[in-house]
Amino acid sequence: MVPGGPVPVLAVPVPNGFSLIEVLVALTVFAVAALALLRLTAVGLQGSGDLDRRLLREVVAGNLAAQWSTDPVLAGDGEGELVNAGRRFVWQRKVVRDHGVAVARIVVRLADAPGEAALVRAARLSGP
């Protein structure tokens, strides 16, 4: 060193990246976010499937009610099975005649799984 010259600066190491702890914390945050998105996707798909089954039940029940309410001969109570869109349905038909006003109510209950059913009502003239 030269007396009266510039004072030497000690070299301080400058970090050039992330520490292992910072990387692990970032990975943990991203993993939790990814799991939350995965769960949200699964719930969305399940809800979509439930809505699809419900819509098909209601459409099939409505079709049966319309068919029976337009038949020339009004059928009585009954039950049975049918397959529509590859799914098996169990139906029940209840016909209530009101001879005072010559109107019949047709109630159709259609189920494809225990606890899941559609209920549709229709009315028509009951005839003689």
Image: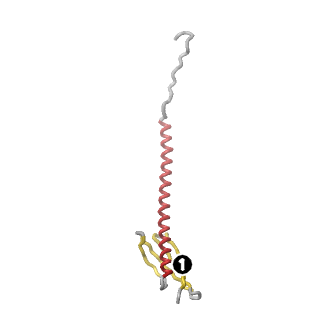
Report the residue at 49% width, 54% height from top: 39
What crowding class fits label 1: few (fewer than 14 Cα within 10 Å), some (14-19), or many (20 or more)?
some
Q: Residue furthest right?
A: 100
Q: Residue furthest top?
A: 3
Q: How many marks?
A: 1
Estimate the x, y position of residue 123 in percent, counting from the top left.
Answer: 55, 80
Q: Nearer the viewer, residue 40 or 25?
A: 40
Q: Amino acid at mark 1?
A: Ala
Q: In what element is the residue under mark 1?
A: strand
Estimate the x, y position of residue 32 in percent, counting from the top left.
Answer: 50, 47
**26 versus 102 height, above or below:** above
Estimate the x, y position of residue 17 in percent, counting from the top left.
Answer: 48, 33
**Which residue is the site of mark 1?**
122
Report the residue at 47% width, 59% height from top: 45
Q: Quadrant of residue 82?
A: bottom left
Q: Nearer the viewer, residue 38 or 121?
A: 121
Estimate the x, y position of residue 34 in percent, counting from the top left.
Answer: 48, 48
Q: Residue furthest bottom?
A: 128
